[in-house]
Image (cartoon, grey):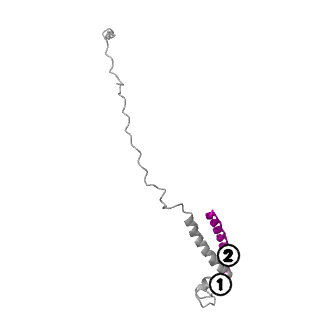
Amino acid sequence: MLYYLLAVFYVLVCFLLLLVVLLQQGKGGDMASAFGGGGSQTAFGARAGATVLTKATTVLGVLFMLGAIVLGVMGQRGPGSLMRGLGGAPPPAPVTAPAPAPAAAPTSQAPAEKTPEQPAPQTPAPQAPKK
């Protein structure tokens, strides 16, 4: 419950920081003033006094950074590292021996020999033509 309350507070701080930064007026620090242009004698322009917006930016920036650290620590689920879910390489699957093949019956048999009860058919010999 405390985690969710801090998360809501953190989101509120983020929106306020965004709003405060966008409301601030630019300091006129363009490229010309960085190199001594613009009539200023300092390298980064004239130092303005700290206004309410710059103080609010500082406070909200610190709250933003601390909130990120606190929520990161509170969001951690117990001790461990980033690699705690990885248990290393999975164990290899057990290798099973192939089942023995059944005794093979002969698939082709030698052609049966002719029995003497069946005489071979006889054909007459061809005769030469007569002239």
Which numbered disc covers residue 71? Answer: none
Judge from the rendering whether residue 80 lies leftward or rightward of residue 22; answer left or right. Answer: left
**In the foreground, 129 or 63:** 63
The residue tagged 2 is 20
Measured as percent of width and height from the top left, residue 53 is found at: 67, 79
Nearer the N terminus, badge 1 or badge 2?
Answer: 2
Q: In terms of secondary structure, where does tag 2 sit? A: helix
Measured as percent of width and height from the top left, residue 119 is found at: 32, 9
The vertical placement of 22 against 75, above or below, is below
* Rendering quarter of residue 28: bottom right
The residue tagged 1 is 50
Looking at the image, how many numbered discs can be counted on the residues? 2
The vertical placement of 13 against 125, above or below, is below
* Rendering quarter of residue 76: bottom right
Measured as percent of width and height from the top left, residue 20 is found at: 67, 76
Measured as percent of width and height from the top left, residue 69 is found at: 56, 69
Amino acid type indicated by mark 2: Val
Q: Is residue 52 magenta?
A: no
Q: Which residues are magenta?
A: 1-28
Q: Residue furthest front?
A: 1
Amino acid type indicated by mark 1: Ala
